[in-house]
Image (cartoon, rainbow, N blue to C red):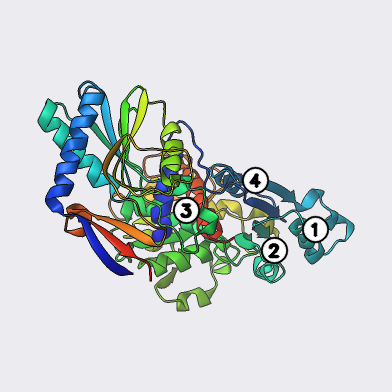
């Protein structure tokens, strides 16, 4: 909760005429992205610059990794540039953890494989706190979050389950049986539902996940049309949710696939707030990790 | 830490605040356009009390703001513990105001420098003045206060604690010695 208090202060900095403070002056933040990203990388870079840190960007696509350099050697090279903190996205689960053993710099996981995307969960929780949270250390006690879609491939779902239940809430996971592994139902505070109406009933917040169409060829879904018919979030489906329930999506959003366009742009939608809150949340993360480090 | 002496008791502290409030009104030729901005933590009640006193004397309540300077400190990298960042609440337009920055103790001057940076990022006051309850010397920067409750020459091993009813339940200025 202390991190969210720091986030409030960072959000305030971003509303001022001069949206910059000198808190991280002299620190260097490097973004190491071995997978494509728009909002995560940009918002980390914005978060670092808003605190006057220097930023180095590294994208695997244009690097010596393509020539066969190992991950460890790449890190060693970048380490020589006096980096204090790495923001790492990698297609392999556990890669940021491995990198942390090879450097003294701090590592922030910006998404690894299908394992975790902790700052996305933090910004989702922060956004929800503002709408449905209660004061105290269990702000989501008695609140229900439903996550709909490709749970199996989603690091966002995994991190959100972990954080939302940690803060006292209950999570319902919903999607086609091929995309919702049964073992998720064994986690404390988590239940599974295969029908959308049943999953959304009584929910205070519903999050649609991006349908990872690149994996469709694996035969996990019969067709997109069937997915839309059975799992697309619409105002009609949301009618069964708790009064005032909100809709979220971690992006990138494919309109009228996971989420009805009218719903995405309507008053229930927190999608734009999620993106906007990404910067102050990441400012708070960078600040918390770097201050007092030297 | 070992307690050494009480330098100011409650009534003395209150009298010093009244004197400072009068000095502020006198130097600024009234209370028009004044803004009291307290530096967290104990500068905040000092700013509020000064604003209340000025309102009593002049019938105009100056703006009151709260300033947290954690994000502007130049010694953040030397702090071992995680500094708690508090909210800055300056809900008025600082442009053109006659601003009085309020704090409990003036020591090295680094807090004042950080506070000036933070204020200037919000706009351009017509003038910034500086009021402190205690000036204990040992400046590391060319900074001085315009209004001082009490000048207390100290050694570097000593610690000055300003206690205020709003925060500590009692008004007092105490001198302590580091163990």
Asked if the residue under mark 1 is in contact with the one under mark 3, i.e. CB atoms within 8 Å, the reply is: no
What is the C-alpha distance between the residues marked 4 and 3? 23 Å
- Specify the subunit that label 4 lies on: A
Vertical relation: A221 (above or below) A234: below
Q: Which of labels 4 and 3 is toward the front?
A: 4
Label 3 in the same subunit as label 1: yes
- Furthest toward the right, the residue is A67
| Residue drawn at (45%, 42%) of the image | B114
- Mark 3 or mark 1: name the one nearer the start of the chain: 1
Q: Which of labels 4 and 2 is toward the front?
A: 4
Residue pointed to by mark 4: A54
What is the C-alpha distance between the residues marked 3 and 1? 32 Å
Q: Residue A77 carries which label?
A: 1
| Residue drawn at (14%, 36%) of the image | B53
- On screen, residue B64 versus residue A30, left or right, reads left
- Mark 4 or mark 3: name the one nearer the start of the chain: 4
């Amino acid at each position: 909760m202390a991190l969210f208090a720091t986030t409030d202060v960072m959000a305030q900095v971003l509303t001022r005429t001069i949206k910059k403070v000198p808190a991280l002056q002299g620190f260097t933040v490097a973004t190491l992205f071995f997978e494509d990203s728009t909002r995560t990388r940009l918002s980390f870079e914005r978060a670092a610059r808003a605190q006057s840190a220097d930023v180095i960007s590294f994208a695997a696509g244009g690097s010596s990794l393509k020539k066969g350099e190992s991950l460890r050697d790449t890190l060693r090279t970048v380490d020589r540039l006096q980096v204090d903190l790495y923001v790492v996205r990698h297609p392999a689960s556990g890669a940021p953890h491995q990198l942390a053993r090879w450097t003294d710099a701090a590592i922030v996981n910006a998404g690894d494989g299908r394992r975790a995307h902790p700052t996305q969960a933090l910004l989702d929780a922060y956004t929800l706190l503002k709408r449905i949270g209660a004061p105290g250390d269990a702000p989501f006690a008695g609140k229900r979050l439903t996550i709909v879609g490709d749970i199996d491939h989603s690091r966002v779902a995994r991190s959100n389950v972990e954080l939302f239940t940690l803060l006292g809430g209950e999570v319902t996971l919903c999607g086609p049986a091929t995309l919702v592994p049964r073992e998720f139902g064994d986690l404390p505070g988590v239940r599974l539902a295969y029908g959308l109406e049943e999953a959304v009933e009584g929910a205070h917040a519903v999050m649609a996940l991006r349908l990872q169409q690149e994996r469709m060829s694996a035969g996990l879904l019969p067709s997109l049309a069937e997915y839309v018919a059975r799992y697309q979030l619409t105002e009609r489906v949301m009618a069964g949710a708790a009064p005032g329930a909100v809709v979220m999506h971690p992006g990138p959003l494919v309109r009228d696939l996971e989420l009805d366009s009218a719903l995405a742009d309507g008053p229930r939608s927190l999608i734009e707030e999620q993106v906007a809150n990404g910067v102050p949340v990441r400012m708070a993360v960078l600040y918390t990790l770097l201050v007092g480090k030297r | 830490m070992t307690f050494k002496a009480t330098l100011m008791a409650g009534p003395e502290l209150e009298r010093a605040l009244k004197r400072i409030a009068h000095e502020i009104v006198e130097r600024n030729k009234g209370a028009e356009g004044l803004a009291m901005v307290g530096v967290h933590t104990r500068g905040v009640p000092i700013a509020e009390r000064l604003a209340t006193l000025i309102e009593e004397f002049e019938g105009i309540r100056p703006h009151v703001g709260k300033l947290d300077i954690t994000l502007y400190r130049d010694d953040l990298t030397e702090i071992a513990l995680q500094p708690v960042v508090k909210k800055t609440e300056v809900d008025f337009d600082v442009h053109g105001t006659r601003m009085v920055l309020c704090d409990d103790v003036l020591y090295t001057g680094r807090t004042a420098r950080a506070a000036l940076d933070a204020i200037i990022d919000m706009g351009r006051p017509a003038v910034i003045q500086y009021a402190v309850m205690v000036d204990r010397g040992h400046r590391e920067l060319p900074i001085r206060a315009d209004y001082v409750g009490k000048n207390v020459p100290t050694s570097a091993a000593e610690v000055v604690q300003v206690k205020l009813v709003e925060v500590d339940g009692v008004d007092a200025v105490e001198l302590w010695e580091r163990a």
